[in-house]
Amino acid sequence: MTVILERPYTFVPPHRGNLWPTAIQKLRLIDRHLRNRESVVSYELRHADRLAESLAAGHGIVLAPNHCRYADPIVLGWLARQVNTHLYAMASWHLFNTNSFEAFALRRMGAFSIYREGNDRQAIETSIEIIANAERPLVLFPEGTTNRTNDLLKPLLDGVSFIARAAAKKREKAGLGKVVMHPVGLKYLCVGDAWKWADEKLRDLEVALSWQPRPASTNPQAILERLFRVSEAYLALKEIEHVGKASAGDLRPRRDELIHFLLSRSESRYGLPTVRDACVRERVRKVRAAVATAYFAPDPETGAVIERDPAQYRIDSEAADLAQFLLSFPDQYLTPGQITDTRIVETIQRIQEAIYGKANETMPMSVIIEVDHAIEVSSKRGPRGEPDPLLCQLESRLRTMMEALSKEARDFEQTDHAVSSR
């Protein structure tokens, strides 16, 4: 659950010193963490010199990567090591509330909190200050959240361009020079046998669903058919849990109907407008904000804290999380001609998160970290009523990189298993 009900939000500032991040790099702690916790065993840096040039020029720097896995902020430590710098990064507040060690480690690596359920002025001002003073490059994920879909880019949030422009204006006024934004493409590739891994993990999921396990098979077509069956079973279980019965038909309209049901129920409870065609991510954000606001609202007369039963608030928060999670199963991701081994692994791991609460990170991965040319950030916004030119340029650059990087995965039709099964 991303809305924290145990205590109201308090800003977690970044650790400003260099001793801890330097020690973390010297001891190769990020390498160990990525290998042991995320199974990211190797990396390839492309065009790190572009970032090095911006650092040498003394620019205020924003790094804007795509966001497909929880490992993303950590793998950028390899880029930082290559160009001899440290990074700051904005991270959702709920990540600082998992356990005390992770909260400690996040801060020492340069992370600070952002309250996604409301307007977090401290986080925004901290971001602007970091860029304007050119303390270190600041990592801002323009998609906002991760959804384990490496080849697709979600709509970008305008916060990244607002922060970059505000910093550029502040830096320009002080005569300190430019602010630049580097789009960064992250692409994870399977190192081991994805089909063998998929067969084993699908068998585990089938057992969890009380099905008779299928005979071991690494035939990609059989893997794909089993994956669709498990996906449909998960959706049917959620329909029964929330609506009372499973529906029939194609998965996409069923998914969309369940998302609408989950959100409209909470919207009605908090007096929010229900617009079926509205952006799901925006509806989720408003529900989460309403939950947090209502739960922590003080007594209107005395201003005293009110002890409330968190049960219903948890239900609404978890419904919003589920709606966003269901949206992360993208349309056309596993269509003929577009299927790769990494897409199969991503989809299985997404279902594992849904059923077990955590993905099985045992598929060895290598990551490509590609730095694009710097985009100079203007302090002026585009004409009113027109698309933000900075956000449009960033989106175009990221899409181009991701499209090219997606072709480096092993294609479904070209694997040894597919050939041998014909």
Image (tube, grey):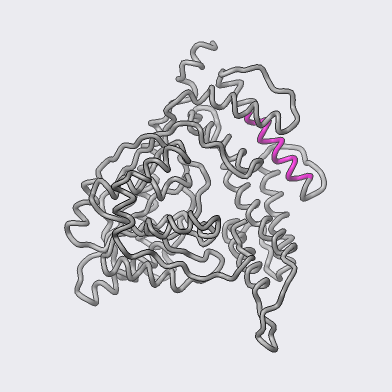
Instruction: Reply above or below: 284 against 367.
Output: below
Tag count: 0
Q: Which residue occupies 42% across, 28% down? A: 191
Q: Is residue 236 magenta?
A: yes
Q: Which residue occupies 61% across, 38% down? A: 352
Point out residue 97 in the picture as x, y percentages from the top left corner.
55, 59
Q: Nearer the viewer, residue 382 or 39?
A: 39
Quadrant location of residue 388?
bottom left
Q: Nearer the viewer, residue 57 or 311?
A: 311
Point out residue 32 in the picture as x, y percentages from the top left corner.
39, 40
Q: Is residue 108 magenta?
A: no
Q: Nearer the viewer, residue 12 or 366?
A: 12
Q: Which residue occupies 77% across, 38% down? A: 248
Point out residue 367 in the picture as x, y percentages from the top left corner.
38, 38
Instruction: Reply above or below: 376 against 219.
Output: below
Quadrant location of residue 251?
top right
Point out residue 105 in the picture as x, y percentages from the top left corner.
43, 55
| Quarter of the image that includes the N terminus | bottom right
Instruction: Reply above or below: 257 against 193.
Output: below
Looking at the image, which residue sits at the far right? 244
Q: Nearer the viewer, residue 299 or 378?
A: 299
Position of 38 compared to 9: left or right?
left
Position of 186 compared to 18: left or right?
right
| Quarter of the image that includes the C terminus | top right
Magenta region, residue range: 227-240
